[in-house]
Image (cartoon, coloured by chain):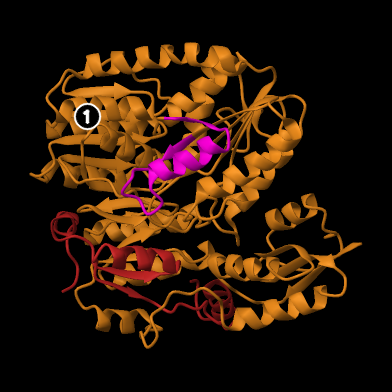
Chain colours: A red, B orange
């Protein structure tokens, strides 16, 4: 199980997945923090549109 | 003759850093006077219009990219083509060749199975959903992105709380966990102090002012400014505070933010009182006053740091506060030979620094106009046009949609410094340079260049006052940054509160 409490996070220090501004990834690397940069791209269809389509097709309230 | 052109790239998403890097490449082209790449938000269209670009017939929405160029007519087409090419392979990326970048969260987690946190800084309209996925994967989240709806914030925080996870943000620019700086953070020493802050540059200012007093910080938990509003209920603030109170390494607790909603403030103070640790509470501009040792209530950022440092050093917090305010009185002597007539124009990259400066100025010289004012009647009708005493927060959402935060790039703010300097009613221009990880490598250089240009036109009519929020261990080096500003004729102060007071005494 990955989940750890806030106290455990404070005790162990951050190990980071960086999603976005690459400078933050570089800065964490320079502080010797374990970090992975995610090559993030926007979804082809946004989730709001997807849920509207779902509703139109009679897929419930969500 | 200079010509201009705006090209619309439909449905193109790029992060702000990429856009800035490409714009810089275009600006270095022969014959190009000005180039900018921004997402076509309403605010960015307004900014382009203010810069003299014709935008009335532009058909574009916030998912479209605008490439705007001005210069020699013969090179405009080539510049736009060059931009489109560069966007396919952005310049200046530092990634190590051969370094694999996973394309999914699962991929990232298989590369770093021990990951315990996600730092998310993508556009706000996507950031909430990504944060949701990260919580599902059991990660604490720091959500740097702004423009995330409050309903999404509430649902993320409730979900996180159930799982015992923290959601720092949205709009959380700064945090420190076990001495590690996340986002915009200063390279200050670690020590016995733990902070919780609903104010990004408020956190940075207290962190830096503690370091100036030789006191270190082990953890600084950011919450995002909205966390302490009634609707959100201080979920992250309370969780962070409880964790610090349980942490045996933390001897002094510091709370920072604008005043929380009354019910949230009551909850927070109840948790704090139960913890029995000495604490400095810096709810800036709050009405609460009167110390209840070991709790000390403060109204400004440097004051909060001075009190916390005294607590950490076993000294009397009340005397530390008194000494600080006496030192502010001495600024009147410093201002005497600098006297100017006219208004103050404050140009801030730090939101809390802008807020604190408005509070101080309002107390000393009267109300201040702003795009993020203390009272709604002082809101600027147009954030790009000052009136009377004005202080502009360039980190507000209106300026950061599809555009780099001013702490990462001061180009836009430096242009405003130039135009404010041409206003005959202005006596003092006041600004900040915030240093640290994530920030521009030379913010003082960007601002100093504008000051030098402005002084050539305005001579000595205007006094320039600044504060450099940083320490020598920061990537930019605080002493070096101060020197750059001082050489350009700027008076540099030791704290944000000091700079705001000096500016007031100069015109007051």
Residue B246 appears left or right of B383: left
The C terminus of chain B lies in quadrant: top right
- The number of numbered discs placed on residues in the rendered structure image is 1
Residue B191 counted in the magenta span? no
Q: Decide: is B326 above or below B439.
A: above
Q: Is residue B386 visible?
A: yes
The residue located at (53%, 37%) in the rendering is B487
Which residue is at the front of the view, B212 or B107?
B212
* Residue at the far left in the pictured view: B248
Q: Which residue is mark 1?
A: B309
The residue located at (17%, 59%) in the rendering is A5
Q: Decide: is B311 above or below B120.
A: above
Residue B36, x across and y down, in percent: 69, 63
Q: Quadrant of residue B404?
A: bottom right
Residue B407, x across and y down, in percent: 50, 50
Report helix, strand or loop for mark 1.
Answer: helix
> Which chain is mark 1 on?
B
Residue A8 appears left or right of B349: left
Residue B124, x across and y down, in percent: 51, 62
The residue located at (57%, 14%) in the rendering is B337
Q: Dot 1: within a 10 Å radius of its alpha carbon, few (fewer than 14), some, or many (20 or more) residues?
A: many
Residue B263, x across and y down, in percent: 35, 32
Q: Decide: is B147 above or below B496.
A: below
Residue B485 counted in the magenta span? yes
Q: Which residues are magenta?
A: B467-493
* Residue at the far right in the pictured view: B1
Residue B413 appears left or right of B222: right
């Amino acid at each position: 199980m990955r989940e750890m409490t806030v106290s455990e996070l404070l005790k162990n220090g951050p190990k980071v997945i960086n999603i976005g501004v690459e400078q933050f990834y570089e800065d964490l690397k320079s502080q010797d923090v374990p970090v992975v940069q995610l090559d993030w791209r926007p979804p082809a269809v946004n989730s709001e549109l997807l849920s509207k389509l779902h509703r139109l097709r009679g897929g419930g309230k969500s | 003759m200079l010509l201009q052109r705006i090209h619309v790239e439909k449905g193109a998403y790029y992060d702000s850093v990429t856009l800035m890097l490409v714009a810089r490449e275009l600006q270095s082209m022969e014959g190009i006077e000005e180039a900018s790449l921004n997402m076509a938000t309403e605010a960015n269209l307004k900014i382009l219009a203010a810069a003299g670009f014709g935008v009335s017939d532009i058909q574009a929405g916030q998912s479209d990219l605008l490439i705007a160029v001005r210069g020699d007519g013969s090179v405009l087409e080539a510049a736009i083509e060059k931009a489109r090419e560069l966007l396919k392979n952005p310049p200046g990326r530092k990634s190590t060749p051969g370094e694999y970048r996973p394309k999914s969260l699962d991929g990232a987690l298989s590369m770093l199975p021990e990951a315990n946190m996600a730092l998310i800084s993508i556009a706000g309209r996507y950031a909430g959903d990504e944060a949701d996925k990260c919580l599902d994967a059991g990660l604490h989240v720091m959500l740097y992105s702004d423009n995330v709806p409050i309903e999404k914030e509430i649902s993320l925080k409730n979900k996180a709380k159930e799982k015992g996870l923290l959601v720092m943000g949205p709009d959380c620019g700064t945090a420190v966990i076990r001495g590690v700086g996340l986002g915009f953070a200063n390279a200050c020493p670690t020590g016995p102090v733990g902070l919780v802050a609903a104010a990004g540059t408020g956190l940075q200012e207290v962190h830096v002012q503690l370091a100036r007093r030789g006191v270190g910080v082990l953890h600084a938990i950011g919450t995002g400014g909205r966390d302490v509003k009634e609707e959100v209920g201080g979920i992250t603030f309370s969780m962070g505070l409880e964790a610090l109170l349980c942490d045996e390494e933390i001897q002094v607790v510091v709370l920072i933010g604008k005043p929380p909603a009354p019910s949230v403030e009551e909850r927070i103070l109840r948790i704090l009182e139960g913890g029995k640790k000495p604490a400095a509470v810096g709810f800036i501009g709050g009405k609460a006053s009167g110390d209840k040792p070991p709790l000390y209530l403060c109204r400004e950022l440097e004051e909060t740091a001075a009190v916390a440092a005294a607590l950490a050093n076993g000294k009397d917090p009340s005397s530390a506060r008194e000494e600080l305010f006496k030192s502010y009185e001495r600024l009147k002597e410093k201002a005497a030979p600098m006297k100017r007539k006219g208004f103050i124009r404050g140009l801030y990259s730090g939101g809390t620094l802008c807020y604190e400066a408005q509070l101080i100025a309002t107390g000393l010289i009267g109300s201040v106009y702003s795009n993020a004012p203390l009272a709604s009647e002082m809101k600027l009708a147009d954030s790009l046009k000052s009136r009377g005493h004005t202080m502009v927060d360039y980190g507000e959402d209106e300026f950061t949609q599809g555009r780099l935060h001013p702490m990462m790039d001061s180009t836009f703010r430096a242009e405003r410094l130039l135009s404010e300097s041409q206003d005959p009613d202005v006596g003092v221009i006041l600004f900040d340079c915030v240093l640290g990880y994530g920030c521009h490598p030379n913010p003082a250089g960007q601002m100093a260049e504008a000051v030098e240009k402005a002084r050539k036109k305005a001579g000595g009519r205007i006094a320039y006052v600044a504060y450099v929020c940083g320490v020598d261990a920061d990537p930019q080096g605080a002493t070096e940054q101060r020197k750059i500003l001082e050489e350009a004729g700027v008076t540099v102060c030791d704290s944000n509160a000091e700079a705001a007071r000096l500016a007031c005494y100069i015109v007051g």
